[in-house]
Each structure stands twice: as C-alpha cells, then as structure tokens.
C-alpha cells in the first residue's frame, strides 16, 4: 500500500448535546405537528477531519471512533454500513471529493446511550466538517435536516427532529414543528442572571445503562401512529414545551420544574416502562433534597439519564449528587454547562504527523 499523501487541511467541528427535551415524542412523523423545548449543553461531540492528497492504493476514508477504540477504513460509495452506520452513512451522504483522502476522528465525553442526543451531535459535527470540503456552506437548519434525513432515509430509523436542531443551533430553543420534518426554531434568549442561575441549578445524572429504544418504544410508536396527531397522550407533552418556554422567560424556576415533572409523568402515561426503576430512584432522592423538577431525557426507557432542576441552595444540590452516586456505583453525575453556541467549525494549521 502507498504511503499517505501530503496533509492539506485539518478541519475541526464541535456540537453540543441536548437535555430537558420537554415535548419530546411530538417531534415525530406520527405526531405530525409538535412543540419541544430543549437545552443545548456541554460536553460537546468533537470531530476532526484530516484531509490528504489521495495517493495510489491508500484508503480513501479512515474512521477513528475514539470512544470505542476502533480505527478502520471504508471505500465510497457503499450503500451498506458496518461498524458505525451513522458515521458511515453521513460520510456517504456528504461525499468526499475525488483525489482527496480523509481520516475522521470522533469523540464525545457523554456516554453512549445517555439519551442526550449524543449521536445527533456527532452527526451534526461530522456533516459540518465535511461541508467544508466543498464550495458553499450549509446553514444550521440545513445541517439539522441533513442529519435527520440520514437517520430516516439512509438508515431507515425512527427519528424525531429536535436533537439535530439543538446540536446545530445551540442555546435554549423553542421548536414548533408545523409539518414533519419542517419546523420553526425560536431561540429563548434570557438575561445573563437567568442563564447563570439555570446553569447552576441543573444536574445531569446518567443511570449507568445505555438507553434501549426497542420493544417498549416500538409498542408506544404503534399506539401513537394508530391514534394520529390528535392522540390525547400527545397534548400534555406539547403543553409542557410552552410552559417551559414561558417559565424561563420570566425566570420562574418553580414553574419550569413543574413543567419538567408534568412531562415525565406524561411520558410514563405513554407506557410505564418509559420511566424506569433507576429513574424513579434518582427522582426520589432529588425530591428529598428539595429539587424543583426532573425530566427523564429523550424517549425514556430502561437506561439513559435524568435532568434535575434543583432549588436555590447549592449545598443541597451537591448533597443530592453525592447521595445519588453513593446509592448505586453505576449512577454518574455528568458536569454540564449551557452552550451558547451550536455547531462550530474551524481549521487548524496542518502539521504533518
């Protein structure tokens, strides 16, 4: 095999993950129309693309999935996907210009299966980085739509729209899906003191098990798709998105907490297993420490994570986190910070390695 060609460019991209998706499940094809409120947060998904001249028989595309300790090569076009279908499908969708070879490195500090839209964040960052290989630039909304299409059209998966939007736009968003998959995105802009106070009150707790979306979720989907957009189970979910937006605009944290609780209860009404025993144990501890609200992230299920909104007392929040982590060695507090930015892309000076 020929030695690698000359290093031409180094493209970097980051995109935030998503928590507290009040209104989730209404951003789907079977809901038809929906309303979602969510928060984009660190830790980011990170992508770096090292671009070289294509030389001889060197691999056109090399993927380094750092979290999995895997490095392997693929050749476009493929149509079938092997180790990491989402990554491979995104590369096929975006394409790699002729005479170029790329090495794509991907990393995220958020655990896989955390129910925080990590896969969407990786996809958004990868699409953004690959977009820099060709003329023209995709706007955040176009990147979000592309990421969603890759999951639904190339991979034939069930997929809402809000995760990709949160990663592309960043910040706090009120999303109104008027016709699947098209939506209007309204950033929720609040004064710095409200932003800082919200950030200080939030906690993200990973239950230590990957989110599973198979049997229970398929059961819920079958029930909702048969009921259609007017399904009574969807109405309270849409309302929690509006209540969350309005509460934050006024800095009313107790109202935001109530909206989070209402959303979690509405999730459980779709199917009791969507709020599992690990979630309930964490919620029980949070309640005992005076938390104002809690939201089982994503669609819910056996694993994943919970967002907690604490009260004003920071010492109580820290005591809550300590007790949660002591209750089960698998429970893990993931430090988070609100992300004012969505997708970010820049180039580094190429240094041969």
Image (cartoon, grey):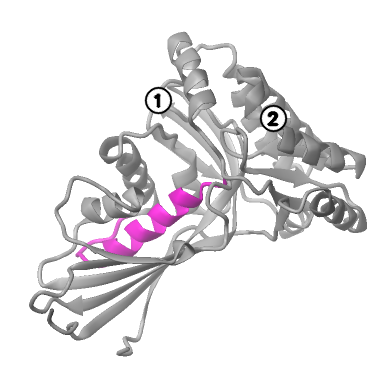
Range of residues picked out in magenta: 116-138
Question: Where the N terminus falls, by quadrant?
Answer: bottom left
Q: Is residue 241 left or right of residue 122?
A: right
Q: Main secondary structure of the magenta part?
A: helix
Q: Residue at x 49, y 57 (%)?
A: 342
| Mark 2 neighbour class, 10 Å CA radius: few under 14, some 14 to 19, many 20 or more | many
Near-viewer residue (141 or 115)? 115
Identify the image quadrant of residue 161: top left
Near-viewer residue (241 or 153)? 153
Q: Is residue 159 left or right of residue 8?
A: right
51 versus 275 height, above or below: below
The tag on residue 29 is 1
Near-viewer residue (141 or 157)? 157
Near-viewer residue (243 or 227)? 227
Q: Is residue 281 left or right of residue 61?
A: right
Q: Provide residue 305's location: percent of width, then percent of height.
A: 65, 44
Instruction: Determine contact: label 1, label 2, CB under 8 Å.
Output: no
In the rendered structure, does residue 133 fall within the stretch colored magenta?
A: yes
**What secondary structure is found at the residue carrying circle 1?**
loop
């Amino acid at each position: 095999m020929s030695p690698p060609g000359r290093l031409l460019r180094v493209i970097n991209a980051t995109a935030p993950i998503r928590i507290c998706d009040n209104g989730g499940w209404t951003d789907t094809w079977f809901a038809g129309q929906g309303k979602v409120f969510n928060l984009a947060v660190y830790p980011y998904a990170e992508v770096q693309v090292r671009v070289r001249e294509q030389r001889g028989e060197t691999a056109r595309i090399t993927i380094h999935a750092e979290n999995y300790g895997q490095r392997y090569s693929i050749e476009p076009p493929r149509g079938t996907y092997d180790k990491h279908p989402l990554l491979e499908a995104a590369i096929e969708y975006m394409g790699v210009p002729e005479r170029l070879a790329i090495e794509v490195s991907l990393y995220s500090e958020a655990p896989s299966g955390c129910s925080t839209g990590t896969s969407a964040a990786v996809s958004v960052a990868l699409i953004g980085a690959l977009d820099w290989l060709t003329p023209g630039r995709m706007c955040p909304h176009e990147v979000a739509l592309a990421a969603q299409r890759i999951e639904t059209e190339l991979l034939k998966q069930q997929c809402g729209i809000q995760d990709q939007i949160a990663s592309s736009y960043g910040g706090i968003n009120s999303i109104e899906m008027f016709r699947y998959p098209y939506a209007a995105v309204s950033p929720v802009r609040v004064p710095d003191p409200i932003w800082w106070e919200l950030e200080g009150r939030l906690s993200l707790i990973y239950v230590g098990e990957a989110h599973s979306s198979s049997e229970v979720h398929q059961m819920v989907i079958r029930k909702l798709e048969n009921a259609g957009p007017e399904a009574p189970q969807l109405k309270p979910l849409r309302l929690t998105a509006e209540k969350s937006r309005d509460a934050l605009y006024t800095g009313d944290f107790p109202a935001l907490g109530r909206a989070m609780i209402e959303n979690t209860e509405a999730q459980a009404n779709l199917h009791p297993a969507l709020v599992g025993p690990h979630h309930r144990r964490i919620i029980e501890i949070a309640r005992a420490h005076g938390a104002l609200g809690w939201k089982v992230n994503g669609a819910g299920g056996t694993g994943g994570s919970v967002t907690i909104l604490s009260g004003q007392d920071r010492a109580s929040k820290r005591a809550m986190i300590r007790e949660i982590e002591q209750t089960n060695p698998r429970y893990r507090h993931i430090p988070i910070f609100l992300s004012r930015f969505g997708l970010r892309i820049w180039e580094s000076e190429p240094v041969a390695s």
